[in-house]
Image: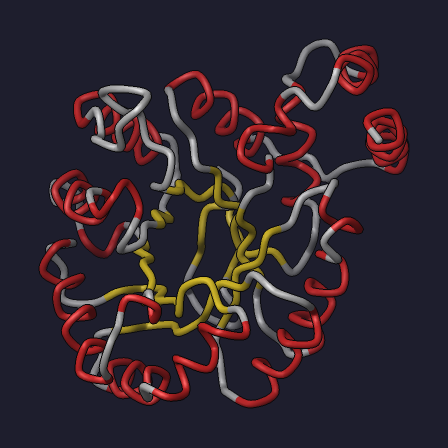
Amino acid sequence: MEQRTYKNTDISVSLLGMGMMRLPKISPDKEDIDEKAAEAMIDYAYAHGVNYFDTAHMYHDGGSEPFVGRALKKFDRKSFYLATKMPVWMADTPADIERIFQFQLERLQTDYFDFYLVHSLNAGHYQRMKDFGAYEFLKKMKAEGKIRYLGFSFHDKPELLEQICDEYEWDFAQIQLNYLDWEMQDAKRQYEILEQHGLPCIVMEPIRGGTLASPCQRSNELFEAANPNVSVASWALRYAASLPNVLTVLSGMSNMDQLKDNIATIKQFKPLEDSEREVIEEAVMGWQ
């Protein structure tokens, strides 16, 4: 599995990270996890070199964290990197920040988090983070060894991202980045801001919730004509993974076929060539 090194450390993170937001479900209209199928996916990912597992307090209506804690318990804790997030919007008082954090440690059956994020920062959540002293508490947890690297995930405009990076000291950040949102949601500028601040980038939604696995008939035809031996989704995954400041690309996979395809794409990773970027640009124009 292709790996990226976190700054000047001995931390080597798999370029493909496993997101725990869209795990297989027992029923399509409910969020209950099909734990047998999901655990088989985690086991397969781990066996094939994936070592970054990302969850959050509210994924699967609160079911993701406890499931992930059980599923990863069988592995040596030092052999993988665990990430989860602080949902500041779920806190009514500053005391709730600590309560949620301690609850997450219990649910994930761990003494520390490798990568911990303030979840989904936008203008409103950022203000609540400030009002409730969430950053100060999490810095304290980092000083105590309960967090190794502290970051945030982001859903807003580049101007706010610049402010967040300027006002606080962070270790990394997570943004939505894919070849459609590179311009549509100004992911390009967001990526550049993280580069300028020396913050490794974790990518979420590289396949845009599955949309880029089959954008439209014209785009699909262009991708398949350029390389009939790979999936359409693999183009989107490689697009994000080709950026040098990307630490890992999170994919929220829902079945074993998606997992195997993503692993095959990253296991012998080849950055996009200029000719392939031209195919992507044409596909985007064909879709629009």
Residue 63 in percent (x, y) is at 20, 42
Apparent side of residue 171 relative to residue 165 in the rendered image (left or right): left
Residue 138 vertical position relative to residue 42 in the rendered view, above or below = below
Task: Indicate the quadrant containing the C terminus: top left, top right, bottom left or bottom right.
Answer: top right
Tell me how many marks there are: 0
Give the residue drawn at x 80%, y 51%: 183
Colouring convention used in this rendered image of the protein: secondary structure
Residue 281 in percent (x, y) is at 87, 35
Residue 47 vertical position relative to residue 104 in the rendered view, above or below = above
Residue 60 in percent (x, y) is at 28, 40
Residue 171 vertical position relative to residue 38 in the rendered view, above or below = below
Apparent side of residue 227 relative to residue 82 in the rendered image (left or right): right
Q: Nearer the viewer, residue 42 or 97?
A: 97
Apparent side of residue 200 relative to residue 162 in the rendered image (left or right): left
Residue 92 in percent (x, y) is at 24, 76
Give the residue drawn at x 59%, y 41%: 206
Q: Nearer the viewer, residue 102 or 270?
A: 102
Give the residue drawn at x 48%, y 29%: 263
Give the residue drawn at x 43%, y 16%: 257
